[in-house]
Amino acid sequence: MMKVGLISSLHLNHGGMSLHTRPGDPMPMQTFVPVGLLSLKASADTAGVPADINVVEVNRLLVDGTIPNTDALYDDIAASVLAAGDSLVGLMTDADSLSHTVLIGQAVKRRSPDTLVCLGGPAVTPISAEFLERFPWADFIVRGEGELTFSELLSTLHAGGDPADVRGVTYRRKGESVVNSDRPLVKDMADLPWPAYYAFDMTTDANLYLDVGRGCPFKCSFCATAPFWERRFRMRPIDDIVRQMEYVRDAFGRTSVNFSHDIFTCDRNWTHRFCDEMIARDVGVTWGCSTRTDVIDAELLQKMGAAGCEEIYYGIESGSPKMQRWIKKNLDLEQCLKVVKATKAAGVRPVAGFIVGYPTETRETLNDTLTRFFQFLQEGEGRSQLFTLVPLHQSPMFRQYEKTLNRPAEYYDAPVTESRMAQIQQYRREHKDLFCTDYRFASPDINEALIDAAEELSGHVVVLASLWPQLLAHYDSPLAWFERWVAWIERYNDQHSPGTRYRHQCEPRDLLVFAQEEIARLGIEDSPVAALVRYEMMRLDAANLPAPGPRPAASTVGPESALRPGDFLGAEFPYDLQELLRGETVRAASDGGAYVVTRKSAADKIETIQLGRAARTFLERADGRRTARELIAEAFPESTAERDPQRTLDHGLGLIRSLAGMGLLLECPAGAKALESPPGAKALDGPAPTRTPARPAPANGTGTPPRPGPQALDAPVRVPRKKAEAR
């Protein structure tokens, strides 16, 4: 029996990267259930192939530190995934990490020269012959849809047969690459077995993408999906999908999944039937999917929401009608906006994706896309993404513009050590045609720095989603803001990060420092947008606060308890912060100002709380010496206390206990030393424009409920914040 190891590709978690990440730092990777590899194993097992197949998810080994990030990284990966006597190792490939896969493959061959190395996936399918010619350590490439091809290849090798008879395989014979005839796609996906979930630790938090269908019938010129699947659209049977969801729920406790299909609602009647089945069986598993805005409607959205759909990704691709026609996407952008609104109305999160950097991009088309990006960011409540165009071998556009690939992309790469990165960069220079996704097309009609600066920008913009409607109103266009930003970040990085590969990339704090300078330039220091920038800076600063320790029960706080402030940041704002964050017409805060504090919750999230006058007094005057009774006397007018002293004491004590329950006030142990400088209640004037190596505030906001009804002046109100979740 053959022994076979299947290895996942590296998937970087871009949200875990920053300009402070250094070569050799721990690797922030995305962990996922390798459904594609598990499908290969299931197909081979079902067919009775005499092979013992082991599936390894490398990203998990990197995240948990099993494999350290050293000069020996790729050798350590090879050592971790190779089992004694392995006959063949299969490497999954994708465009973003192909160069890393090359180094893993080399390490496998060095460690075990007799082990055959096979690659598969969309990154190597269109370049299979060239790849084998350049990299002699690779023995086979499984092209296209892999289940049947891989099973037949294993059976052939086990029997000592000739791989020339296996359709869909590229192999080497006498030093020359041989490309066998293509294998037809599977006609009925019901013929494919379920992925071998039994061969993977499904109880982890790894993302699960169910293989519910394949293919796309559309003709977008920048995309490789339709050519890879020969423009054929296929779905698994509805009952098959639902039973898989029930299975992962019952066997592994999975109550949320994603569907790995580009256009889930391509057949609207099929989608209606699927939703009907989900509702009738009360599956209890939420799901997310992707689709186009022109193959969905409000009626279907309502049913999808009722059937457990939580999120839909819409590939809008360009905000320019001219570019929509040029890339053959042909979406009606106003209709796209209506669909996003209808998605929200159905209780489903909409995520809109846009692309810049097309070879024919102009200032006009870029401005149109930026305008729509910010519009959809607001309408989608902080859920919009901006990407740069990635050259893909099988896309129609690639053949026409391949020769214009003229500069390396500025997207974040895994922070391998300097020596390993030098090796990767050398491969990318020597084999630009193979590693084309690491480069960008020339855009001769526009300053290419504008494209480079968009590489990693949207994740930071989304974190600050509430800021843009207020700030962009002071510019002639989003492009006018963006051009000023790009020139600023170039100068800033040249000064603070000289020699960086990411000259146009940033941190959220950089955007706020730039906004502060722009606010001064525009003369709007007393405007609502200035207050928003100050608030967002305070949230970033709150990420540096210590994690809260155990809190005593608030009920233990009595009138004679000495109190001190907890760890938080506080500032007064001239506007009602809740109205600012909701984008409403703002009014001056009651009583001359709104006092706002930010603190870190036990779940390591940043919470924002708007406090009234009495609560502010408690926080500002608590010093470890004053008792609750004394603080109450200082917070309420004498006339109020004289009229009903017991009611005033009870009311004040209730408020103090509420603040203690949130960790904003802490009870001092008897005999504890008073504080010379309380840590909380500090007004913030904004830091100097220098980077601090602090983790940005979490993008998912406070997690607090919608704004409550009218409150007493002295009652704390948690400020709801639009979620900024990126897909």
Image (spheres, helix red, strand yellow):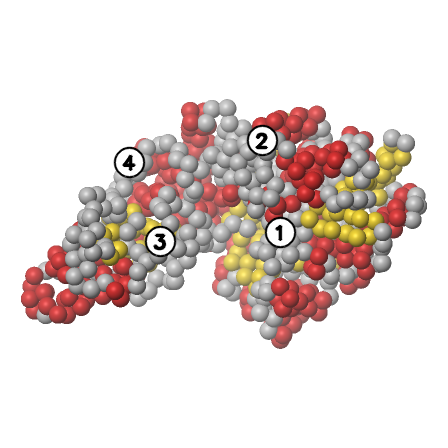
Q: Is residue 228 left or right of residue 273?
A: right
Q: Marks 4 and 2: which is nearer the front?
A: 2
> Which secondary structure lies at badge 4?
loop
Q: Is residue 211 left or right of residue 146?
A: left
Query: Pointer 4: what residue?
Result: 523
CA distance for labels 2 and 3 = 36 Å
Location of residue 210 (image quadrant):
bottom right
Which amino acid type is shown beneath numbered disc 2? Thr
Q: Marks 1 and 2: which is nearer the front?
A: 2
CA distance for labels 4 and 2 = 46 Å
Mark 2 packing: few (<14 Cα in 10 Å), some, or many (20+)?
Answer: some
Which amino acid type is shown beneath numbered disc 4? Gly
Query: Pointer 2: what residue?
Result: 417
Location of residue 173 (image quadrant):
top right
Q: Earlier in the sequence, mark 1 or mark 2?
A: 1
Query: Pointer 3: what residue?
Result: 549
Q: Position of residue 329 (x, y in %)?
A: 64, 47
Judging depth in this view, the residue of 31 and 406 nearest the camera is 31
Disc 1 to disc 2: CB gap under 8 Å = no
Marks counted in the figure total 4
Q: Earlier in the sequence, mark 1 or mark 4?
A: 1
Which amino acid type is shown beneath numbered disc 3? Gly
Q: Earlier in the sequence, mark 2 or mark 3?
A: 2
CA distance for labels 3 and 1 = 32 Å
CA distance for labels 4 and 3 = 43 Å
Judging depth in this view, the residue of 147 and 388 nearest the camera is 147
